[in-house]
Structures are given as C-alpha cells and as structure tokens.
C-alpha cells in the first residue's frame, strides 16, 4: 500500500511515466499487436498469426540487412570509441584556449545536420573528382567509387559514422577524464610509469563506468543506424540500401516495407524483432558490466 | 468568501468560449502540403498569394501551407490517412499515386471534376488527366506541375572538344560521338546513368519502345522486352568509360557541370535556376535541348507530373475547390511566368507570354516524347525491390559483370520474381 508520505514522490515521477508509457510502451505494445496482422493503414487489419515474422525472416533483404548490420556494428562501435578515446586524451592534454578550440572542432560534426554531413561526404567520396580520389590520384591510385563499389561501401559509411559520432563520445569521455584525481598520475609518475602504462592502468579502469555507458549507447545507436546510409545512398522509399543492398540496414528495410510497400504488419514485426535484438544485446552488456563492477 | 464575482467571471468566460466555439464551427482550416521548394522564396510568396485570394473569396476558410521533403510527404500522407487526420490538399508524384490510393489518402474526385465547367476541364493536358483517371468514373488527382527531361549542354566543354554547338545532336549516334570527343579532351561526358532508377529509365527511353516499359498489373509481370532492353543496356556499356562516376542527382554532378568538367546533364528543368545563376556569377555557358532519340526526329527523356490530391472527409468539397483554384489557368499562368517552369495546365502553357519562355517552350515540346516513369498510374504500387533490381542490373552490365543480352534476360526474370513476391 502506498504510504501518504510517498505520494509526492509518485507525483514527481508521474509526468515521466505518463510520457514514457504514451510514447514508448504504447508504441511497442501497439507494434507487437499489429505485427500479427496484415494491414496497409487504411483497410481493416487481417489477423495472420506469425506470417509476418516468417515472411521477414525468410526474405533476402532481412538476411542482407542483418549481415550488413553485424559487420557494421562490430567495426563501428569499437573503432568509434577508440577514436573518441584518443581524441579525448588529446584534448585533455591541452590547456586553456587550445583545449576549447579542439573540443569545439571535434564536436562540430555532432551538431551538423545529417543531410549536410552526407552531402559533404558524397562530395569527398565522388569518383574521379572527389577530394579522396584526388588525393589517391596524386599517389597513383586509380579512382574508387566508394559509394557504389560493394567492397568499399560499408567502410565508407563507417568512416562517416565515426566522424559524426566521435565528437559526442569524446565529450563524455573527456568529462570522465576530468574526474580522475591527479594524484593517481602523480604517484604513477613517481613509480616510473610511462604514459601508455598510465592510460592502461589508471585512465581506463577509472573511466570504466563512462566507457560502459559509451559502449552501451554506441551499440544501441549502431543497431538502429538509418539516416547516414539512407542519405549516402540517395535512398527513397522506392529504392534504398544502395548498390546490391550493400548499405541496407534493418531500420531502412522496416521503413521501406511500411511506407514504400504499405506492409505495416511486416514493418511492425520487423520493428519488434529489432527491439528484441537491441534489448537482448543491451541486457547482455549490462550483465557483463555488472560482473565487471562487482569485481 | 464572496463567490459572486468569481461566478460572474466564470459565466462571462463560458459565454466567450461558447461564442468562440460557435465561430470555430464556421471556420474551416485546410492543411495544404506541398514540396519544400514550393514553400520557399518566390514560390512561397506566390502560393501565399493564391491562398489569400482563395480565403478572401471563401470567408471562413483558412489554409495552412506546409513544405515537406519527398519522403516526408509520402509518410505524412499515409500516416495521416491511417490516423484519420490527413492533410486536406496535398502534392505528391504520380508514381506514388497507387500507394496513396491503397492507403486511403486520396478521394475519388470524378464527380467533382465532372461538375466543373467544360471550360475548366478542357484546360489541362489530356495525357496528364488520363494519368489521374485509371478507370471509368474514377479520378484521383488534378495534374499540377510536371517535367520532361532536357539535355543540358555545357557549351564551353563542347567547344573545347571541338564540337559545333550551333545545332543539338540529331540522334544517339551523333550524341555518342560527341561524348567520345569530350572524353578525348579530358572532360567527362555524362553522369553515371546506372545509379538512379530515373536515369536508367531515361536511357531506356532513347532506344526502347514506351509501351514496353512498366508493369502489367493484370498478369503481374514486367512489360520489359529483353530484346529491346538489351539495346538500352548496351548504351550503359558504351557510356561507362565516358562518365563522371557521379549520379545525375549528386551535387557533385552540378558542380562538375558548373566548373566546366562535365559536358551533358540529362535532368529535369529544376537544375536551371542553379545553372542560370552560375551563368551570371561565374560565366557558365550552357543551353538545353531535347534529349536525342535513336534516330533523327526521335526524342527521349522521362516525364512525370506532380499531382494535387484531395483527402476524403468532411472538408473534401472545399479542399477540391481550393485544388481546382490553384491549378486553374490564371494561377498556373502566374506560376509559369514566375518560375519559368512547365505545368500540366495546357491552356496556361499555350499562352503567348508563357509559350515564348525558352525553358517552357522546350519542355512543352519534350513532354510530347517523354516516357512515363512508372506506368500505369493509380493501378498498382510498384514493389520496393523493383527500382533496385533495375539499377543493380544496369550497373552490373556496365561494369562488364554480364553481357547486355544475359543482363536483359535476368532482369526480366528478377523483376517478375519481385512483382510476384510482393
């Protein structure tokens, strides 16, 4: 039974819970419900059981999207965090104006609208005339069609993604670095520890909670990747994923099925599958993290 | 505590609110969704002028215009229809018509159309009206603006390649010879035409029969004939070494054209303002001509119309009146004069003042030869896999991974599988 003294507490969490239930729990429950129906948004929904799930899992696009996603996540998350960590160490080594300058410079891609970032990178990647191909040309390397060659498309995307996300992760890691007491490093230096040893034995362990957050957030974001590959490949609801679906990802496929094909039941099932994947991976990360914290 | 003053205030408030509610009941607010470039700069000012005129003639009607990107228009119209709160009057492209009908976003305006004076109905392009009317007593849109591709030529690049620019290439063979000369002069001839569905369709239109393009929804098969399509695929192979590698929609393509690195750009007239500005600012020398066809006297390029749709519901009548107003000749005439852009109002296009505008004159001529991008309209939705299969196939052939003959055969099979699996 709720004691009277707890009522103000519940009242304070009520606005959040109301919004959370309306914009998070209800859409998930609604998505789960519609995932069992054949529904095109206008006609009466027809119950089809698990047909939507079977149809999706058996489809070529789902298969391609999941393989692309696995490759993308396994590279972009560790690479992105490593770059962000390196940038944070670099910025932390500066003082005063230069620290502000580099922090701002590295953060700019985060605030850049996605379409602008994609436009810039489409120019950089352009065959023959793009900045990257000009540099390669000076070195005698023939022009590469980064966004149309299925062997390079994923890496081209990862480079953009790391460029966009590194600044955000850098700021978080930088805040963590500022909280590490200086006397740890002082003691290490007195004991003759090198810079690398200080990073490995002091910085990383002390940053563990921050890194855990960055890794978890990185996984959740990467699993939902959508806007950058959508824009880099010039996708629309009529065609998406780039050449031979090399940059097709689950959220793109889900959106295409929903708004391109009006198969909202399939799109709901897709969304629910993806939600489950994200929940399972996040739960796994938390379980792993709890074990580490316990140590 | 004396509650009388409070009761008095509450009574006044209730009266005001009820009066407001009565007033609101007489007010109709229409949501009018347009492409984002219709809601910017001079185009927006003119649209606002149309709205003000309509509101003045229809007291109690208020129209709110919103500009949206291509995908946002479709998602908004579909979700709006699903939630029972669609925009009242809206634009989209003809190729999305079938999806909008399936989603219940479009009202059948046939009765309203037939109730309009004959003079009103006669002013539109006949083909465009036919596109909106998939079967008897059915009409899902008013054709609004539109385009047919033109061949934009960079005259500086062509002159550097030793090409006489006084007359446009008369056919594909002559055009292709010019492309080779451009490449020999160290410039790019064309964008990569395999990257975008519309540029594949455009290239097909050079050599392929129009009646063999699209889906036969009765048999659920593609209409593409592998023998005809093989000729189109050969064009991609021929153009591959001459191309810039950028797609026709890339900003890089426009930049290459403006900086005298690219000779030809087959695209709609929407690039003209950019090129026109470059001509004034940086001295770009360019013109636009009809896209050459396979033989002299034949022309190519794709055409499409942006449509005005009306949502079913209680505001459908007044929404139709507004759609009819903005697509009527006086408005389309002002639109054409302001933007120098083609639209589906044939009467406006034939007005002497408009007909002599070069871009419109060329577009009016080009539309007669244009290939519909995704026919038939409002009959069935093209499956999601369709576009990707077409572009992937063209790219594979251009890259030499398969021959045009084999590519054409496998395309038809893949497209039929895609249609059957939808």
Image (tube, rainbow, N blue to C red):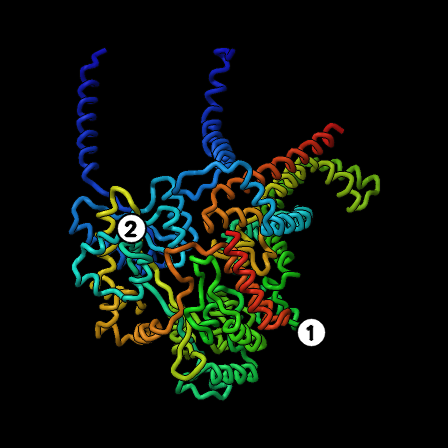
Of residues B276 and A232, the one drawn nearer to the viewer in this rendering = A232
**What label does residue B105 carry, if any?**
none
Q: Position of residue A192 (x, y in %)?
A: 84, 42
Q: Quadrant of the C terminus of chain A?
A: top right
Of residues B196 and A224, the one drawn nearer to the viewer in this rendering = B196
- Residue A71 appears anywhere in the view: yes
Q: Position of residue B134 (x, y in %)?
A: 33, 58
At a point 55% along the width and 65% down the height, the residue shown is B411
Residue at the far front: name it.
B219
Instruction: Give the letter of the chain under mark 2.
Output: B
At a point 16% along the width and 51% down the height, the residue shown is B56
**What label does residue B108 carry, if any?**
2
Q: Position of residue B108 (x, y in %)?
A: 29, 50
Find numbered disc 2 in the image and state the secondary structure of the residue it sits on. Answer: loop
At a point 45% along the width and 75% down the height, the residue shown is B206
Q: Quadrant of residue A245?
A: bottom right
Q: How many marks?
A: 2
Q: Which residue is mark 1?
A: A140
Say left or right for B350 vs B246: left
Of residues B193 and A257, the one drawn nearer to the viewer in this rendering = A257
Instruction: Give the letter of the chain under mark 1.
Output: A
Find numbered disc 1 in the image and state the secondary structure of the residue it sits on. Answer: loop
Spatial separation of the CA atoms under disc 1 and disc 2: 61 Å
Can marks 1 and 2 be said to lie on one chain?
no
């Amino acid at each position: 039974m709720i004691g009277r003294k707890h009522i103000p507490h519940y009242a304070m969490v009520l606005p959040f819970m109301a919004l959370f239930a309306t914009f998070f729990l209800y859409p998930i429950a609604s998505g789960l419900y519609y995932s069992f129906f054949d529904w095109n948004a206008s006609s009466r929904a027809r119950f089809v059981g698990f047909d939507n799930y079977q149809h999706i899992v058996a489809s070529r696009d789902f298969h391609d999207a999941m393989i692309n996603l696995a490759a993308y996540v396994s590279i972009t998350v560790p690479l992105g965090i490593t770059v962000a960590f390196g940038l944070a160490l670099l910025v932390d080594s500066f003082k005063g104006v230069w620290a502000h300058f580099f922090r701002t410079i590295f953060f700019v891609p985060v605030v850049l609208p996605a379409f602008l970032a994609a436009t810039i990178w489409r120019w950089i990647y352009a065959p023959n005339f793009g900045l990257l191909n000009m540099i390669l040309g000076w070195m005698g390397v023939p022009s590469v069609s980064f966004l149309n060659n299925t062997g390079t498309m994923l890496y081209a995307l990862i480079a953009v993604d790391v460029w966009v996300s590194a600044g955000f992760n850098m700021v978080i890691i930088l805040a963590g670095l500022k909280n590490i007491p200086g006397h740890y490093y002082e003691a290490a230096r007195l004991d003759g520890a090198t810079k690398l040893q200080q990073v490995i034995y002091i910085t990383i362990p002390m940053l563990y909670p921050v890194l855990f957050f960055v890794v978890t957030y990185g996984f959740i974001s990467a699993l939902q990747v959508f806007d950058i590959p959508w824009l880099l490949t010039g996708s629309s609801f009529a065609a998406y994923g780039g050449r031979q679906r090399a940059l097709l990802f689950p959220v793109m496929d889900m959106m295409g099925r929903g708004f391109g094909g009006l198969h909202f039941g399939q799109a709901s099932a897709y969304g629910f599958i993806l939600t489950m994947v994200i929940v399972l991976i996040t739960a796994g990360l938390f379980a792993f993290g709890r074990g580490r914290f316990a140590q | 505590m004396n509650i009388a003053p409070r009761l008095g205030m509450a009574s006044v408030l209730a009266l005001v609110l009820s009066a407001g509610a009565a007033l609101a009941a007489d007010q109709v607010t229409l949501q009018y969704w347009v492409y984002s470039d219709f809601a910017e700069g001079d185009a927006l000012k003119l649209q606002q002028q149309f709205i003000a005129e309509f509101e003045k003639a229809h007291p109690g009607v208020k129209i709110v215009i919103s500009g949206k990107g291509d995908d946002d228009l479709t998602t908004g119209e579909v979700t709006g229809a699903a939630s029972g709160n669609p925009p009242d009057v809206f634009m989209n492209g003809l190729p999305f018509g079938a999806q909008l009908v399936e989603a219940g976003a479009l009202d059948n305006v046939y009765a309203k159309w037939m109730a309009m004076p004959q003079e009103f109905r006669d002013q539109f392009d006949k083909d465009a009206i036919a596109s909106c009317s998939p079967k008897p007593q059915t009409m899902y849109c008013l054709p609004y603006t539109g385009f047919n591709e033109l061949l934009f030529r960079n005259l500086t690049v062509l002159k550097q390649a030793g090409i006489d620019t006084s007359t446009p290439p008369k056919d594909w063979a002559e055009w292709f010879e010019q492309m080779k000369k451009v490449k020999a002069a160290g410039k790019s001839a064309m964008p990569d035409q395999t990257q975008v569905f519309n540029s594949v369709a455009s290239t097909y239109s050079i050599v392929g029969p129009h009646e063999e393009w699209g889906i036969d929804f009765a048999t659920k098969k593609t209409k593409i004939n592998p023998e005809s399509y093989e000729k189109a695929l050969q064009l991609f192979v021929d153009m591959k070494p001459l191309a810039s590698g950028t797609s026709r929609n890339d900003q890089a393509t426009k930049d290459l054209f403006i900086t005298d690195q690219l000779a030809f750009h087959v695209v709609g007239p929407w690039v003209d303002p950019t090129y026109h500005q470059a001509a004034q600012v940086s001295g770009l020398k360019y013109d636009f001509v009809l896209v050459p066809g396979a033989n002299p006297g034949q022309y190519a390029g794709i055409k499409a119309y942006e449509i005005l749709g009306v949502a079913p519901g209680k505001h459908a009548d007044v929404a139709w009146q507004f759609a009819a107003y903005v697509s009527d000749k006086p408005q389309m005439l002002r639109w054409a004069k302001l933007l120098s852009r083609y639209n589906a109002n044939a009467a406006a296009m034939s007005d002497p003042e408009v007909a002599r505008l070069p871009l419109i004159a060329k577009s009016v001529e080009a539309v007669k030869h244009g290939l519909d991008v995704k026919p038939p309209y409002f009959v069935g939705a093209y499956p999601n896999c369709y576009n990707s299969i077409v572009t992937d196939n063209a790219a594979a052939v251009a890259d030499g991974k398969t021959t045009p003959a084999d590519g054409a055969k496998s395309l038809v099979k893949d497209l039929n599988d895609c249609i059957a699996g939808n």
